[in-house]
Image (tube, coloured by chain):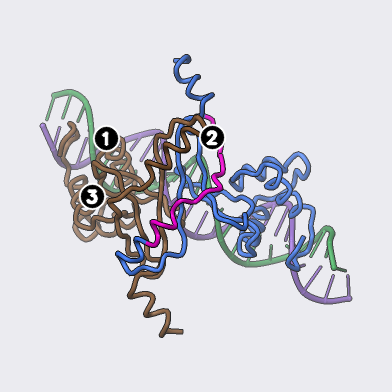
Chain colours: A blue, B brown, C purple, D green
Amino acid sequence: MAKGFKNTKQRSAIMNLLAERNTPLTAEEIGEAIAPSYPKLALSTVYRNLELFTNAGLLEKSFFQDGVTRYSLAKGHHGHYLICTGCQEKIRLEDCPLHELEHKLTDETGFTITDHDLTLYGLCPACKGKTKNGK
Amino acid sequence: MAKGFKNTKQRSAIMNLLAERNTPLTAEEIGEAIAPSYPKLALSTVYRNLELFTNAGLLEKSFFQDGVTRYSLAKGHHGHYLICTGCQEKIRLEDCPLHELEHKLTDETGFTITDHDLTLYGLCPACKGKTKNGK
DNA sequence: TTACGTGCAAACTTTTTGCCTAGAC
DNA sequence: GTCTAGGCAAAAAGTTTGCACGTAA
């Protein structure tokens, strides 16, 4: 574990989980996923470490439509998510088509644009099928 | 007030405020803004009505980087925000350049894309000046 | 051994719900 | 007068903090 933090079992477990799942998770989901191995893991520990790793640049926060903060491994490069509103599957989009838009807005508004969030929502092929049949 | 709701002072006050400000506000900001006129206004009333209006299509929710839900008048057409991280000014962008991206993603992933969030963050010209001088 | 990290409990913030009264129609 | 809406208080959900003990280095 880089950065001069102490390497604890809890910290490894959090980072390993996020590496395995490779999708944004809430603090609670992380706590539950780790509970089988470390039943006493406190949610406050999860929050403290997520915050620590985020500040260190190892993780990034995402905010989706339910207002709950999710964390995922920080990719060096920029990306966004396409989320299925049926099964919550999250697909990371490696492509970011917004630089052109940012230049245009800088010209129009005088803002220096430093960051943006883009998230798309829809139904994946599997959930489309379910909606048609079920109900 | 349309839609068959009862027209109460509280509901008018909420909608009038959102129409005046024309920017996304949190439930708490709405409550504080209305307090001078209706000191007993309960935050639960604000939340209930914001939810009601959102379901009726009169308001829309926005989720920014602090994880607090904000509400604003629903424009018939689609738009996004450019937010100054210095003064929190929120500029609505009437343009949405993402339809092309959505088509591309539909082809690539098979998703039916139903919605998306796009928010840009930066420093407005005034706050850029302050950052340079102050500190 | 020492300082940092953890668990636990309590506090805090944001949002939701139940219940009874008040007010719109 | 009826039935929806509002006020109040408590609860629920998500997150943060203080403190004493545990543990990596």
Is residue A93 toward the left or the right of residue B90 in the image? right
Residue denoted by label 2: A88
Q: Position of residue B36 (x, y in %)?
A: 21, 61
Q: Secondary structure at mark 1?
A: loop
Of circles 3 and 2, which is in front? 2
Disc 3 from disc 2: Cα separation:
33 Å
Of circles 1 and 3, which is in front? 1
On whether disc 1 and disc 2 are found on a single subunit, the reply is no
Q: Position of residue A120 (x, y in %)?
A: 45, 41
Q: Which mark is residue B56?
A: 1
Q: Secondary structure at mark 2?
A: loop
Residue denoted by label 3: B14
Amino acid type assigned to the residue bearing label 1 in the image: Ala
Q: Is residue B124 above or below residue C9?
A: below
Q: Tag 1: Cα neighbours inside 10 Å, few (<14), some, or many (≥20)?
A: few
Q: Which residues are magenta?
A: A87-103
